[in-house]
Amino acid sequence: MQRVWRTVTGFYHVCARGTGKQLIFEGDEDRWEFLELMRECCRKAGVTVIAWCLMGNHVRLVLADYEDAMSAAMHRLLLTYARRFNKRTGRTGHLFQNRFDRRSLDTDWQVMEAIRSVHANPQEAGIALVECYPWSSFAEYLRAYDNDMTRGFSDPSCVLELFGSAKAFIVYSLSTLDDGESAMPDLEETEWERHAFAEKLAKGLGVPLDVVKAASSAQRNTVILGLHDAGFTVRQIERYTGIGKSTVSRIVHAYAQVDAQAEGSK
């Protein structure tokens, strides 16, 4: 059965890691090359880079993908960069882990939190303050609020309205790091919102949420995998569908193994 990856909104939080915690950048030249490749691969695939951050052994991105082209863009980006990096450094073997991680972002709050999290990565790692780290899109957001048309590697324009102003963006980005409290708590997801989205997703996959438990095994599995790929936990799926946690876990793990084998055979 085909895996269900597409999110309703088209936004995703993506992370690509060096294999075995391998450093993927040896200097600024490598970082600039990765960013240029990222822009080229995403542009050709019709994928928009919303936010980005380059760390020593991993990259975190927020992407907008409305044409289901993200996988192709990411595979091309990581493969091309790895080949060039290996040739330049004389190393051999895989540079990145076989799979990049991705999580769908299905509410405004999830999109805002993903952007905040991407920009906060260096500070949370104890490397540099958010506003001082040079290898993230944080500064591009500030320039966009000032109507600075300097070309960057991200396009914040489609989400800037969520913050409303540069001040709100800065407060939201930094205050959650300082005191653990969201600067815009009214946007935080409620249980009702999560359940409503799960219901919408289940109907889109052909089975109303309240009848998933009684559906055929194929229909049941489709909805469970769709919910899981949309970011719902096993416990949430159990609660929303009435299907036991052990059954949900078994289905998720079984298809994860099939997916991993498919990736390994490519």
Image (cartoon, rainbow, N blue to C red):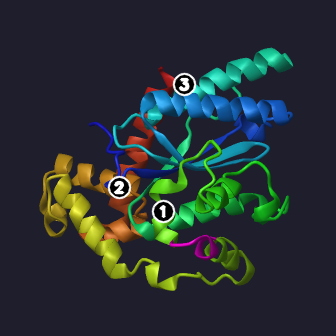
Which span of residues is magenta-colored?
164-169
Q: Secondary structure at mark 2?
A: loop
Q: In the picture, which quadrant includes the N terminus?
A: top left
Residue 111 — which label? Answer: 1
**As rendered, which of 93 and 168 lies closer to the eye?**
168
- Counting from the top left corner in percent of width and height, residue 145 is at 59, 62
The residue tagged 2 is 9
Q: Can residue 77 be spotted in the picture?
A: yes
Describe residue 229's horizontal placement relative to residue 226 as left or right.
right
- For disc 1, the neighbor class at 10 Å (few under 14, some 14 to 19, many from 20) is many
Residue 191 painted magenta: no
Describe residue 214's horizontal placement relative to residue 55 as left or right.
left
Residue type of the residue flagged with mark 1: Val
Describe residue 13's horizontal placement relative to residue 179 as left or right.
left
**As rendered, which of 15 and 145 lies closer to the eye?**
145
Q: Secondary structure at mark 3?
A: helix
Which residue does the image show at 13% across and 57% down from the upper left? Answer: 215
The residue tagged 3 is 76
